[in-house]
Image (spheres, rainbow, N blue to C red):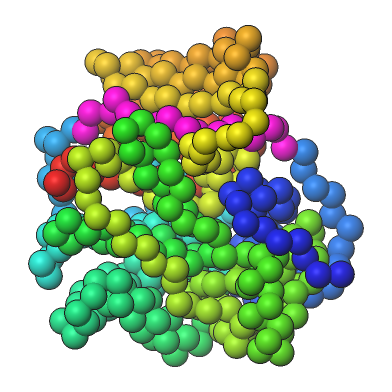
Amino acid sequence: MPPPSISTLSDVNEIVSTRSSSDFPGKQTGDRVGPTSVSGSLKRKRPPTIEIPNVLREIRADTKLGFGEFASRNDAVCFSGSGVGVFSVKGKKKFMEDTHKIVSRSHGIKGFFGVYDGHGGGKAAEFVAENLHDNIFKMLENCTEISEAVKAGYLKTDQEFLKQGLGSGACCVTALIGGNEIVISNLGDCRAVLCRTGVAEALTNDHRAGQEDERKRIESKGGYVEMHRGAWRVHGVLSVSRSIGDAHLKDWVLAEPDTKTLYMTQDMEYLILASDGLWEERVSVVKQKNKTGPRSSRKNKVSIKDSENDFACENESPPSKTQKISFRTSTNVQSPNQEHVIFKKRPASSGLEAACNQLVNLAVTRGSLDDITVMIIDLNHFK
């Protein structure tokens, strides 16, 4: 039975599964990587989707900190500088498999930003964080279009990693700002979201084995897709259909990213890059569309405001029930309904960093067990 067509973010979120930390293809289990034999593991029950139509509109960036190259793989990392904030936490696995990279003005660009989510071990994500941006910068010297340089840099990084003889892989999402262009690229299930005049727009589509176009591509090359642990997987092992690495499936798992070029406009406010740990617990972003039918009574939103280190998060579903979550510097964060949501104490931070922290907390308190990395870029800083 062929997998269903998956064309929207909410469709992707219907796939329920767990994650893997194994470095050996034959023993891998989890959301992205699973064993070749089928087991009867139970699916976890998940809460309803929270949509984020409005996010970060009133965040003010802290520009006091210096801005330079930054990459880390600690259990918990927070950073903010001129125009960017990031927050990263380790999930249930023994080792952190997420990495990220921030590079300031270099090779004629205003900034390069990347979030990398490893699977089957952290080696691929580490390698990507160390090499992808350099390979893209080198390609810029020979390519007339930035988007072509980015694609070539992804492919070169994949080729170089495969020579290492390691079995892990990495999903990626990157943003390169050059002049008035923003080039967004992704592999796998890391995502990019644009905040435009307070409205969140999904910029990327996940690459999943269950998508009809990806399944047909895999089958046309002699591969196959089968259901395991609640997800369609390449050869019953890997749920994403594009990544850097994954040498054992390279004949079917591409390293060529989807790339989209945007032109900077005054209504563009913030760009969010995040690993799938943020989205896996049904925290989705939806595009605002004109609907012919009556408007649904269900309205979910998350808004984060910065006012003297006081941030708020609202969840309305349905409108008659409103949940407000707020926290101040050096205080424990709790919702009125403490049975379901309890936020842990976090250190004081700038607006962007605290916004990243809030989104991470949202996913964690809703049951995410994965590594989570969230990066927020203030586009006003780069105009």
User: Residue 373 placed where, x, y %?
Assistant: 44, 48
Q: Is residue 293 visible?
A: yes
Task: Count numbered badges in the picture.
Answer: 0
User: Residue 225 placed where, x, y %?
Assistant: 75, 74
In the visual, does 336 lie left or right of 383? right
Q: Is residue 19 visible?
A: no
Front-most of residues 241 and 269: 269
Residue at image point 52% right, 36% down: 290
In the visual, does 292 lie left or right of 30? left
- Above or below for 21 versus 370: below
Front-most of residues 109 and 347: 109
In the rendered image, residue 285 lying in the magenta stretch gets the answer no
Magenta part mainly helix, strand or loop?
A: loop
Residue at image point 54% right, 52% down: 276
Q: Place residue 44 in its image quadrant.
A: top right
Residue at image point 30% right, 71% down: 147
Residue at image point 19% right, 79% down: 144
- Above or below for 364 versus 216: above
Residue furthest to the front = 292
Front-most of residues 287 and 228: 287
User: Residue 156 placed where, x, y %?
Assistant: 36, 84
**Quarter of the figure with the N terminus:** bottom right
User: Residue 362 placed where, x, y %?
Assistant: 52, 32
In the visual, does 305 lie left or right of 142? right
Q: Place residue 58 in its image quadrant.
A: top left
> What's the magenta region?
46-61
Q: Place residue 136 in its image quadrant.
A: bottom left
In the rendered image, residue 57 lying in the magenta stretch gets the answer yes
